[in-house]
Each structure stands twice: as C-alpha cells, then as structure tokens.
Image (cartoon, rainbow, N blue to C red):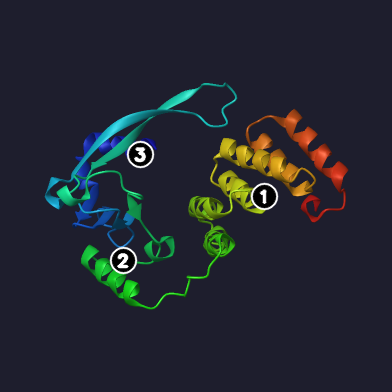
Amino acid sequence: QSTLDEAIQRTPVYNIFGIDCSEQYFKLFIRGDESSPVLLGRLGGKVVPDNTLMEVSTFTREVEGHRVAGTTETLPCLDITLVKADDSLGEWEEVLSSDPNMVNQPQGSLEDFQREEVRRQREPSPDREDWTAEDWAEEQKAFADNAFKEGNYRDAAVYYTRALRYTPKNEKLLSNRSVAYLKASRFQLALDDAIAAEALEPNWPKVYFRKAQALLALRRPEEAVMALVQGQGLDPNDACWE
C-alpha cells in the first residue's frame, strides 16, 4: 500500500493506469501489463467514451476485525467517471458485466475482447425455458464452486449471491458464501451469513462451525467457543469437526 501511495504522489495517474473505453465495453489496466487487466467487461448501457475521466481521491472506511471498534483508515481511491449516452440514462441493472474465468486469461486489446464477446453471444446456449429457481441457482453455484477452488474468493461470493437471489432461504448457499467471505477477509459478512444459515437450519452442526470461524476472525473467542460447543452438542461426530 505504501509503495502505491508513493508512486501516485510522484507520478501522474495516467502514467500508472490506462483506460480503454468504447460505447459498451471497458478496460482498466496497469501500464506495462495490458494483458492482465484490473477490470474488463461489458457495460450495463452505452457511454460517451471521449468523456471518460480518471483521477485519484481518498476514502475512509472502518478497519474490519480491528480490536478497537470504530477504528478507521483512509486509503487512496481511483475514481473513474463514465458519462452515459442519451439512450442509456437511468439506473443500470449492472454497471459492468464480467466473466472472471475469461478476464483471468491473457487479454489483447479491447477490440479483441469485444469481438470474442460477440462470437460467444452467437453460440447456442442451453435451453432454459423450463428452468426452475433451483436450476438457475445451481448454475450460479457451479460458477461459485469453481471460483472458490481457484482461490478467487470474491468472485465466488458474487456467484453465491446470485444463486441466493433465486433461492434466498438456502442454508447451504449461505454457509458457502460465509466461508468465501471469510477467505476474502470480510469477516462480519461471513458471520452474518452463518447467523442467517443458523436461523434457517438450527440443527445443522456446520453452521455453528462457520459461525465460530467468523467469530474467531473478528477476535471474539469466547463467543466462538460457545458456537463450537453448541454445534458439537448437536452432533459430535459430524465431518465438519475433523
């Protein structure tokens, strides 16, 4: 973090980061490493590329998991402003749609990415006319599971969130998202999901294990021990205790 702060102070931001923007596609990259973009995807509507702005500002946030509640830190923030085209005003359902599996592969220019996206959209997709909410959730869960196995925990949490939109009372999805948040160091969110899963299935030992993990990360060991005792009391031989 200190290295980034020093670089920003010494060097204009446009010499560190680069932007490539078309009407419907966007790419943010570090100069000299264009093949590994920071952001890359299709925008939720059309923009005016020539009006795109980039600047550095700061934002203040609470330090998650700090032993002193309310402790804050101020960090540099890269602000990017995109001006919506006249026919795309209003709220977009999603600002930037991006496939993590594709972005993690070496990339060429934004034009190359755009052509590949068009080609993929033309390919036949599975017949989903008869899909239930569970089917849609299962598809997103598969994406989440793959992202988690690859160590992309934030992406996994996003996919689990999408799955939960279809089946919001699925305690297993909440448990999975809890551990994804835990791996991504978002400890309070991990605890919130564990508590929600517990409310749905209070007799499932694993939710207490997830709860204890999050509480330990939040430096609340006494409560973590209570959660473990409660879970083991339900089933001391459950696989989660191994």
| Residue 114 rendering spot, x and y as whole percentages | 25, 67
Callout 2 secondary element? loop
Residue type, mark 3 in image: Thr
225 is higher (above) or lower (below) than 238: above
Q: Quadrant of residue 81?
A: top left
The residue beneath circle 1 is: 171
Estimate the spatial distance between the alpha carbons at disc 1 and disc 3, rounded to whole Å. Answer: 42 Å
Callout 1 secondary element? helix
| Pick the front one: 62 or 13 | 62
Disc nearest the viewer among 2 and 1: 1
Disc nearest the viewer among 1 and 3: 1
| Pick the front one: 34 or 121 | 121
Which residue sits furthest bottom? 124
**Number of callouts in the render?**
3
The residue beneath circle 3 is: 3
Estimate the spatial distance between the alpha carbons at disc 2 and disc 1, rounded to whole Å. Answer: 37 Å
Residue 64, disc = none
Mark 1 is surrounded, within 10 Å at the Cα level, by few (under 14), some (14 to 19) or many (20 or more) other residues, namely: many
Residue type, mark 2 in image: Gln
- Lower position in the chain sequence, tag 2 or tag 1: 2
Q: Looking at the image, which residue is at 25% across and 53% down?
A: 45
Q: Looking at the image, which residue is at 35% across and 50% down?
A: 94
Residue type, mark 1 in image: Glu
The residue beneath circle 2 is: 107
